[in-house]
Structure formats: C-alpha cells, structure tokens
Amino acid sequence: MKKKNLVIFTGAGISEESGLKTFRDSGGLWENYRIEDVATPEAWERNPALVTEFYNMRRKQIMEALPNRAHEVCVELENYFNVQIITQNIDDLHERAGSKNVLHLHGEIMYARSSGDENLLYKLNHWEIKIGDKCEKGYQLRPHVVWFGEMVPMMEPAILKASHADLFVVVGSSLQVYPAASLIHYVPEEAEKWLVDPGNFNLSHIQKLRHIRKKASEGMEILKSELIQKHL
Ligand code: NAD
C-alpha cells in the first residue's frame, strides 16, 4: 500500500522541552528584547553588533540543546508515512534527531549568509559570527534567518508540500506569524488536521481539526498511536 503524505508543521513550541524559549509565551524571548531591535532589516542597518550578538546567543543555546521526544516521534513516523517536516524554527533539532525531509521557512541559524549576496551561505560549526567576518566578496556575514518584514522565499515550496498532504499536523505553533501561519489554508479540505499545542486557541474555523492540548512530547506520542491505529 502506498504510504500517505504526512506533513508536520512545527513552531517554537516543539523545541520548548529542549530548553529553547518560544517567543510569545510568558517568559518567552521577546520579554527581554524588542523585535524591532534585533529581528528586522532596519535593526541590522542601525546596530549590526546587537543583532549579531542576539543571534550568537541563540546559536550558542541551540548548540547546547538536544532534540526531545517530539522530534524523535517525527522521525519514527517515517516508518509508516511519507513525512515532510516544514518548520518555522531556525534550530537544527529536527536534523539532529534524524528527520530526512526538513524545510526551513525562516532560515537556519547554523548557517551564515553574505549580507551582499543572498546566495552565499556558509555552514557554521561554532556559535559566533563576529563583526568583521566577511564573505568571499567582502560583505559582512549575517545570520541566515528571515527577519520580520523580509520575504519568505521557502513559502512557495512549502505551499506545494502542504497542498499534497493527506494528513497535516501542526506542533507548537500559535499560528500567528504570517505568511507561515496561512499554510494550513493550502491543505486539502478532506485532509485530516491535528494541532499538538497546550495553548487555548479558538480554531473552530478550521474544518476536520483535532486539537491535542498537550506539550509536544506527550502530545506526539498520542498522535503517533492515533495515526497508526486509524491509517494503517
Ligand atoms: P510562538 O512563540 O508564537 O508560539 C509558540 C507556541 O508553542 C504557542 O502556541 C505555545 O502554546 C506553544 N508551546 C509552548 N510550549 C510548548 C510545548 N512544550 N509543546 C508544544 N507547544 C508548546 O512561536 P511560533 O508560532 O513558532 O512563531 C514564532 C517565530 O519565532 C517563528 O518564526 C520561529 O521561527 C521563531 N522561533 C524559533 C525558535 C527555534 O528555532 N527554536 C525559538 C523561538 C522562536
């Protein structure tokens, strides 16, 4: 029997149990920083040192973190389904857990990018980008992440994947950051949809959605057994 297409769309919440803070929850990152100071093109123009430092701290923390049970369940589901991960996260925990197909909508913190040529990417194996670190064309390196107000170039391939989903799961996302959050609207109407997130949202406008109101690791175990029971 042909494996069904399972698209798993993950947000900051899936990495919370790995010790990485989400942005919007209380105790989240934005309480200590203002978005406009660290995560916009204008912030980079104004104060590249502060922006670089903010992302250096994130990178250091991410390098010290480990994938959790929720990331592992995403890998185990590959035994039963054609799994495509679409993540809003800039961390590399899905890759380190072993997921094969991972699409990053908002970039990858373990890459540096030329600030003068977006095609020049450099894999990092250390946590620090320094002011003065340049690409081969002489431009300052910046983190390879999508800032607020920038285009989301991976949106189109993500929409294509979402539009071919038989099953669509959202894990740990408040579905508030656009255009990423609009992805669910491209999922076929007949596809079953799931949300694994402890948050209290009103998502009654989305048809065929089951909300597992649990943290990611526990919620993904429940999801895995329900999916296997129902679809195999
Ligand atoms: P968000 O901060 O808006 O929402 C986080 C969601 O996670 C909330 O709905 C919350 O209820 C849920 N959550 C909290 N703890 C959870 C847990 N243990 N298990 C499951 N769910 C949990 O984050 P967002 O919607 O992902 O969007 C914010 C943007 O910030 C994204 O673009 C993302 O790239 C970026 N971000 C990335 C990282 C990372 O790479 N690890 C961390 C923070 C923010």
Image (cartoon, grey):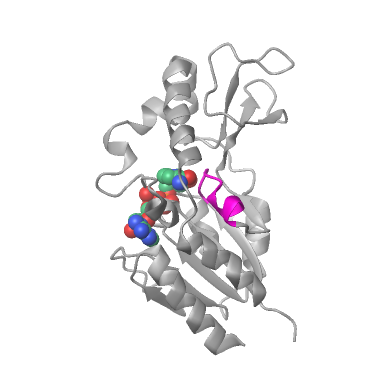
Q: Is residue 201 left or right of residue 125?
A: left
Q: Is residue 203 above or below residue 51?
A: below
Give x and y (percent) for residue 194: 46, 73
Tell me if residue 94 can be seen. yes
Give x and y (percent) for residue 58: 44, 34
Q: Is residue 126 above or below residue 6?
A: above
Q: Residue furthest left?
A: 26
Q: Is residue 148 left or right of residue 29?
A: right
Give me the residue at 55% from left, 71% from top: 168
Q: Quadrant of residue 230?
A: bottom right
Along the line of sight, the residue nearer the viewer: 170 or 82: 82
Give me the residue at 55% from left, 22% from top: 129
Tell me if residue 185 can be seen. no
Give x and y (percent) for residue 193: 50, 74
In which quadrant of the rendered image does the N terminus lie? bottom right
Give me the residue at 41% from left, 64% from top: 216
Give x and y (percent) for residue 225: 49, 81
Report the span colored magenta: 88-97
Q: Is residue 159 left or right of residue 130?
A: right
Q: Quadrant of residue 158?
A: bottom right
